[in-house]
Amino acid sequence: MPRRIGLLQVDPTVGDLVGNAVRIEALAKLASDHGARIGVTTELAISGYPPRDLLLQDEFIRLAQDTASNLGVELPVLVGTPIEPSSARQLPSNGVVRAGANKAKPSGEDSIHIVARKQLLPTYDVFDEARYFHPDNRSGIARTIGDLNLGVTVCEDAWQAAGMTPSEYSADPIEHLAEWGRQGVQLDATVNLSASPYHSDKLSSRIQVCRTAAAILGHPFLLANQVGGNDDLLFDGNSLVAWPDGRVVVAPAWQEGVFLVDLDDAEGCTWIPSDAVDALSVGNDALRHLSPGHSGQEYDEHLLEDLTDAVIAGLSDYCRKSGISSVVLGLSGGIDSAVAACIAAAAVGPENVTGIAMPSRHSSQHSIDDARHTAEALGIVFDTVPIDGLHSSVEGSIGGVLNNGHPVASENLQSRLRGLIVMGYANAQGRMAIATGNKSELAQGYCTLYGDMAGGYSPLGDLYKLQVYGLADEFNARAKALGNIVPVNDSTRHKPPSAELAPDQKDEDSLPPYSVLDAILHAHIEDGLDAEAIAQLGFERSQVVEVLTRLERSEHKRWQMSPAPRVSKRAFGQGWRRPLASRHDWRH
Amino acid sequence: MPRRIGLLQVDPTVGDLVGNAVRIEALAKLASDHGARIGVTTELAISGYPPRDLLLQDEFIRLAQDTASNLGVELPVLVGTPIEPSSARQLPSNGVVRAGANKAKPSGEDSIHIVARKQLLPTYDVFDEARYFHPDNRSGIARTIGDLNLGVTVCEDAWQAAGMTPSEYSADPIEHLAEWGRQGVQLDATVNLSASPYHSDKLSSRIQVCRTAAAILGHPFLLANQVGGNDDLLFDGNSLVAWPDGRVVVAPAWQEGVFLVDLDDAEGCTWIPSDAVDALSVGNDALRHLSPGHSGQEYDEHLLEDLTDAVIAGLSDYCRKSGISSVVLGLSGGIDSAVAACIAAAAVGPENVTGIAMPSRHSSQHSIDDARHTAEALGIVFDTVPIDGLHSSVEGSIGGVLNNGHPVASENLQSRLRGLIVMGYANAQGRMAIATGNKSELAQGYCTLYGDMAGGYSPLGDLYKLQVYGLADEFNARAKALGNIVPVNDSTRHKPPSAELAPDQKDEDSLPPYSVLDAILHAHIEDGLDAEAIAQLGFERSQVVEVLTRLERSEHKRWQMSPAPRVSKRAFGQGWRRPLASRHDWRH
């Protein structure tokens, strides 16, 4: 009987214990129907990751632990769940319980079969685990489970051995497990329950972690990773298995399902999509086989494709989990709102998207025509609401203040009138408003608080301007492949970016060319370089300082930004954690 | 020569190393001029607390450490600063260096005299120190500094001994210091460098911590606490000294200055206000002497007075540190905007405050009259901008959508038009807009995103409605004491709360009476009780569930709330950390 393990690549909703239990049970049934001996969920699958301050409620911990332990499953399943502390003055554990074998038993403490507790608690970047959990110091081992003996680790536990954590931990759970092997405890494989967030180029790091662990342990290392979006965090799935010789098989991204791993036959691994009607299913479902030589970085060639799937998955999952069925956004005829509309149409269906053109006295006719083209190409609802009249009415009301004040006030006014109209549609029709700003302009404060920043979700908020152009090309290519009209026409694609809030206004009147701006921002935000270091890359020093100063000054706006899918390694260096001295841009 | 120690109660700006150095040097000079042998700053005084992700920049750590070590001070000063890690793969320390003694030495590593490193790193509530720092395990002792031998601890280090941390730490720095004493190392006193945030009733806890430490150590325990506001965190100062017999002397709150402690004479302790022109100085500067019997809770009788000073200090410090000299807010004639105007006038001066009455078709004449009364009583600028015309124009533009949609859309429209006008003033005149919502309505989502929530700072955002009435009475009492007209007249004080967005609309049509609402919210948010437990307090279960459900649904709004001064123990249970499933209210 083949040694098959089903990695349950689940898309949980944070806090929805019952809903998550149902999803896990459905995936476990698929796994057992296809001959798996054991099921393994992702990290904290029962609560969803990250549960954050729900973990401060003792009742939530108890309920999660009991729900996980008493899942209705045929085969034994290792379930990620918070675990109650052993003493009142201690924190809970981020652990793994065994379900299935103890189905008959009554609920409560005596039915809890704890298999492992997380040892290494990441507390950096988007992680805050030291806030919630007590670190364990014991190896996780599950013996004779489905006739197999397994090492059991949780996410970060595997990263120290590969030396890929920002700072050293005092322990190395992989080395400890290897020591058990050297002492004669033979394990068939080691599993890792993960909730490893997506960012571009993340997959090759994860592959390296698994290969390192498999090589050290001398047996297959299996990683089950969460899929889907929770707030601004995206989880790509890409569950994988690595053998000691370096062979790797990777499951699909952006899809819920079961990755059925045959420990003895890489070719025998299969992917079984979830049969839930509302299951996340974006992109293609092919398994990827890597020979020992391949780093996995070749997948970066397909980055644009993956990035596009990522932002679609992020918005669609945010809407489903928030009970949102339809959205509305402004369509300016520019590249950003056009791409945002493409994402929205793909995420919730064109029939559920309304685009509104809101021409001002500074808008050109081509802006309206281009907006209409995008709407018609996508098949979304299209309305036109001119704001010139409203703009004049407001000028009539506070003209004295505007005329004697800073000209930006009148520019922001137009943007806020548009925000007000979009929100009017949203409130009246029960839609969610979509903000259309990109990372480059948000990083420069080149956007209006309560204006074009208004919205419940910001699909482009972590994409640099040049990446937005890339997505436009990808969406056009996808349309062509289906024989459809391209949603982003040449006029939209090639016109010089403009907010159209003043006569003949161009972004490049206030900002460097986006090719330069994006490079400077990327060097600072993603690579952590300071002005000096960036200037040494060959950029004009004064320009670098200007860009970084605007970045600092716009902090207050970004702090009020709606959730944006995390597709870059750093979202403004965790902007929301920045200090006041650099956080306030009160004028705009 | 008396054994005098100067506790430097400083008001640092996060990130402003040079500015903070200047403030510390000025206070140190005051201390030495008044006969102090040693100066002691607050925790991370050189960087300001909390520096957050500035601590991820190695260059920032190095600069802070060098600046602290090379302060231009006459007397030896113990300075709180981040300290570089000893190895590249380790995190920095939250520590204390000695300045003054090594003034002559050149800058750089060899001039750094490290006295202590923080051992206990709080990572709960508003604290995230495990994210940034490496915990130390050695006692901090400074010998023969100003002819004294001192134990040196940093904030949390003193709280474990009193058993007043949410979960147990494995170490107890106070016990370790006591052990040194038992081994014959005689210390004159132990100092604690703190950045302990304010919330109501916090002072008595701090007094208990210091008394416990003094009793265990058998010598005076001195706590120097940061004062002032950084973002939404307020630090009240209230530096204090406790003797082993339980005597305590407490320095003033909301004032920058030097608390000169005579180790041998409680009556000899004095307060020296900062002589900086822009020094924070709110409330009175009397020292408070507590006999062993007094818990310090008698100061809670004066809570309203202290709360009022707290919100004034919060806004005034936020403005100074953000370079804001003038503000603007809407004046509805209701209690919230009236009290917000009182706070603004006290914080930045009435001449720098503009209040705008923006009557809608649903506003009564008394609303405008009451708004005018508040403005005239405070002596702030008063404008009137009716919004009925604008409201009609928008209805003309999207009437079809509004008429066939949810009625809340038209209500929000009016609120957003007001936000748009207030922001127009702010942008044109370089003012910061003030949001006037209170904690009760924000907790219920009874407010409009991009409407009355618009603004750079929300002075009432952490005050329940009934506390706002309390502040109104306090401001009126202060006006009477000066022989001035009361800013909040009887009409404003006693009218039934109304948003005036629909005919005869009253808050209590949609919400429980505030006396009930506030009690339910307080039980859940501050005391952490769930619906069952609250119902058992005697509230109607269905009403409790309604309130808590609205609290969950309004999470998305609160997440976008402008900074509000932290005056309660919990701000919506760290709302910004709540999961998506409960965070989204996309309709309003």
Image: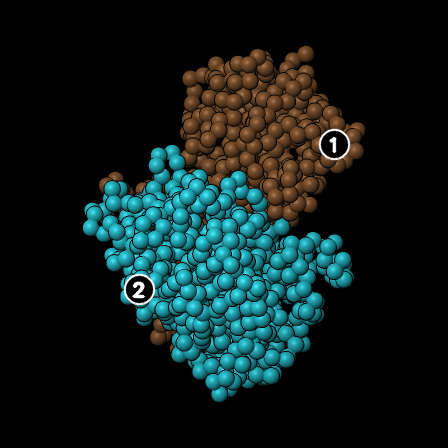
Chain colours: A cyan, B brown
On the image, numbered disc 1 is attached to which residue?
B111
- Identify the amino acid type marked 1: Ser
x%, y% of residue B434?
A: 53, 52
Q: Is residue B238 left or right of residue A153?
A: right
Residue at x 34%, y 58% (from the top left corner): A39
- Residue at the spot x=33%, y=45% of the render? A114
Of residue A102 and residue B388, the one placed in the foreground of this image is A102
Quadrant that contains the C terminus of chain B: bottom left
Instruction: Please check whether the numbered discs 2 and 1 fall on a single chain.
Output: no
Residue nearest the observer in this picture, B497 or A24: A24
Callout 2 amino acid: Gly
Res. A357 in view: yes
In percent of the image, x 64 and y 56: which residue is there?
Answer: A527
**Cα–Cα gap, marks 2 and 1:** 68 Å
Callout 1: SS: helix
Q: Nearer the viewer, mark 2 or mark 1?
A: 2
Q: Position of residue A156 (x, y in %)?
A: 48, 49
Decide which of A403, A4 is in the foreground and name it: A4
* Residue A260 percent location from the top left of the image: 37, 64
The tag on residue A71 is none
Q: Can you tell which quarter of the image residue B110 is in?
A: top right
The residue indicated by pointer 2 is A35
Tell me the quarter of the picture where residue B281 sits.
top right
Determine whether B360 is above or below B131 in the image.
Answer: below
Tell which residue pokes out farthest to the front in this image: A184
